Image (tube, rainbow, N blue to C red):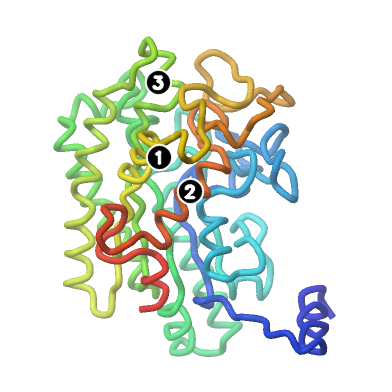
Amino acid sequence: MCKRGLLLLVLNLLGMVVAEPQVPCLFIFGDSLSDNGNNNNLATLAKSNYQPYGIDFPDGPTGRFCNGRTAVDFIAQFLGFDHFIPPFANITGRDILSGVNYASGGSGIRDETGANLGQHISLSMQVVNFHATVEQLKIVLGSKTSVADYLSKCLYSVNIGVNDYANNYFIPEYYSTSRLYTPEQFATVLIQQYSEQLKIMYNYGARKVALMGLFQYGCVPLDLAQNNGACNSTVNSAIDLFNAKLPSLVDDLNKILDGAKFTFVNNTAISNDIGMNGQAYGFTVANAACCSVLTGVETCRIHGSTCQNRSEYVFWDQAHPTEAFHLINAKGMYNSSSSSSYTYPVNIQQLAQL
C-alpha cells in the first residue's frame, strides 16, 4: 500500500474525516513563476534546480524559481490537495489524475520567446503536452466521455506573457518584434495568439480557466538596477496594454465557448496593493534580491548566500518573488471579495465551485 493510502486508512480508523479537494485536478500552464521542474533537464539559462533555490521548500531545490512555495503551490493547498502538482517532465502513471504542471521558465505565448535563454517549452507546446495527458486519461478512465466529464470539473491556471516582453519585445538585438509592431499592436497580436491557444485547451477539455494578468516587470530588481533605482515605465506601459485586454478576452471566450468559465486575475492590482502596504504585510525590502546575484543576471548565484530575513523581502532573485510574496498574492487570487479589483468575474475559490 502506498504511503498516502496507508495514511488515509489510519485516519479512517481513528474516525477522522479526510476532505476531498474542491476540484479533482489542477492543471498549470505558464513560465518561471509556475515552473516546478520542467526546465531541469533542458539546455537553458532559465533553470533553478540548485541551492539556494528551495531553501525553504520541503524537498529543497526542485526547479522552482523561489526560496519556497509559489502561488500555484499555495492555490493547490487552498483547494485542498495534500500534495504539490507534479511537473510534466517526470509525471508517472495515475499521478495525472490530480493534474499536471506544464510551466516552463523563459517561455511565452510566442514560440520564439525565451530562445535567447536556451531551450524552453512554449505555451503552444505546453498545450500539446496537455493533449498527451488527455490521451493518457482516456486509458486510465476508460472512455472519451468520462475524460470530458472529469476535465470539466478541474481547474486550470495559466500565467504567461511576461517573457514575451522581457525575453522578446524588449531585446531588439535578438528579436525583431519591436520593429514590426508598436506596443499596442504587439499586445493585440499576443492576445489573438493567446485566444487561439486557449480555444485549443478548451477543445481538449479545459473549462474552468484562470488567466493570470502580468505583473509589472519594469519594477523587478533587475530593471531597477538598470534604471537608476526607478521602475522602467516603458516596459510597464507595454505590459499594461496587454493586461487591459484580458478582461475582454475572458468575456469573449465565456460568450462563444459553450460551458466555458474563464476568469481574470489582476496580478498588477494585487502586487500594487502589496507594494503600497508593504510594511503592513511585513515587507521591508522591495528593490533588491534576497539571494546573491551576478550583475545583469536574473537568477541566484549557484550555492550563493542569502538574506536571513527572507519573509521581509518581496523578491527572492532579480525577477522572481519570495515565498512570502507568493502567499499573499495567492490569497488575493483565491478569495478576493466581489468588490475587489483583484479578479473578474469571480475569484479562484468561486471558479472552483462553478
Amino acid type, residue under disc 2 in the picture: Ile
* The one of 274 and 343 positioned closer to us in this rendering: 274
Point 50% across, 89% down: residue: 143
Q: Dot 3, how many residues are within 10 Å of its Cα: few (below 14), some (14-19), or many (20+)?
A: many
Point 78% across, 82% down: residue: 11
47 versus 233 height, above or below: below
Give the CA separation, mark 3 to mark 2. 23 Å
Kindly identify which numbered label has been placed on residue 328: 2
On the picture, is 45 further left or further right than 201? right
Determine which residue is flagged by label 3.
223
Amino acid type, residue under disc 3 in the picture: Asp
Mark 3 or mark 1, which is nearer the start of the sequence? 3
Q: For the N terminus, give its image quadrant.
A: bottom right
Point 82% across, 80% down: residue: 6
* The one of 276 and 2 positioned closer to us in this rendering: 276
Q: Position of residue 21 (x, y in %)?
A: 56, 76
Q: Position of residue 315 (x, y in %)?
A: 52, 31
Give the CA separation, mark 1 to mark 3. 19 Å
